[in-house]
């Protein structure tokens, strides 16, 4: 599974999460659970005070493709959308990456070519 976003530990369980400016954390689950309201079919949400959260971290999926470091920003079937993190324009151009913005380079890579797929906690 490709993850890119906040995760929180609350009452010993891990949830996708979204901190709010009001000092709460929205927790998300795919299964009905006590205190969670259906946000849309198959997605349930509950807000809790940030003080009740045991741990809040940002997680992203990283990898190597063609010898360079990337983060994974999406997936579709057997393809991964990868974003170059090396910061060197000539390398990005050599790899044939799409320039999305100044200093932001992405491409679709076959999952079979991606190496060292792992999660990083920030």
Image: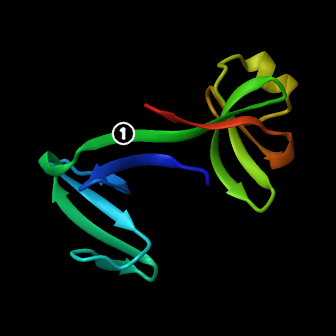
Is residue 90 shown left or right of residue 84?
A: right
Q: Mark 1, residues whose alpha carbon is within 10 Å: few (<14), some, or many (≥20)?
A: few
Q: Residue at x 17, y 48 (%)?
A: 50
- Left or right: 114, with 36 as reference point: right
> Mark 1 sits on what residue?
57
Residue found at the far bottom of this picture: 41
* Picture coordinates of residue 49, whole percent (x, y): 13, 54
Q: Secondary structure at mark 1?
A: strand
Q: Residue 35: x, y in percent? A: 21, 75
Res 25 seen here = yes
Comparing 31 with 44, the one in front is 31
92 above or below 57? above
Residue located at (86% from left, 40% from top) = 113
Q: Nearer the viewer, residue 53 or 105?
A: 53
Residue 115 pos. (x, y %): 78, 35
The quarter holding residue 104 reads top right
For residue 110, say whether it is visible. no
Q: Residue at x 44, y 72 (%)?
A: 30
Question: What colour scheme was applied to this rendering of the protein?
Answer: rainbow
Toward the viewer: 72 or 8? Answer: 8
Residue 58 x, y percent position in the rendering: 41, 40
Q: The N terminus is located in which quarter? A: bottom right
Q: In this figure, what is the number of numbered marks?
A: 1
Residue at x-position 81% and y-position 57%: 78
Which image quarter is the C terminus in?
A: top left
Position of residue 6 in the picture relative to residue 36 (left or right): right
Q: Is residue 47 above or below residue 42?
A: above
């Amino acid at each position: 599974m490709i993850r890119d976003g906040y995760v929180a530990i609350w009452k010993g369980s891990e949830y996708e999460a979204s901190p709010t400016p009001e000092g709460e954390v929205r927790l998300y689950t795919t299964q009905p659970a006590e205190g969670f309201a259906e946000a849309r079919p198959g997605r349930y949400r509950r807000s809790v005070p940030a003080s009740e959260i045991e741990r809040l971290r940002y997680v992203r999926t990283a990898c190597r493709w063609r010898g360079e470091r990337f983060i994974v920003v999406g997936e579709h079937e057997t393809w991964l959308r990868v974003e170059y993190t090396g910061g060197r324009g000539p390398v990005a151009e050599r790899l044939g990456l799409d320039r999305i913005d100044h200093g932001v380079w992405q491409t679709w890579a076959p999952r079979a070519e991606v190496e060292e797929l792992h999660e990083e906690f920030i």
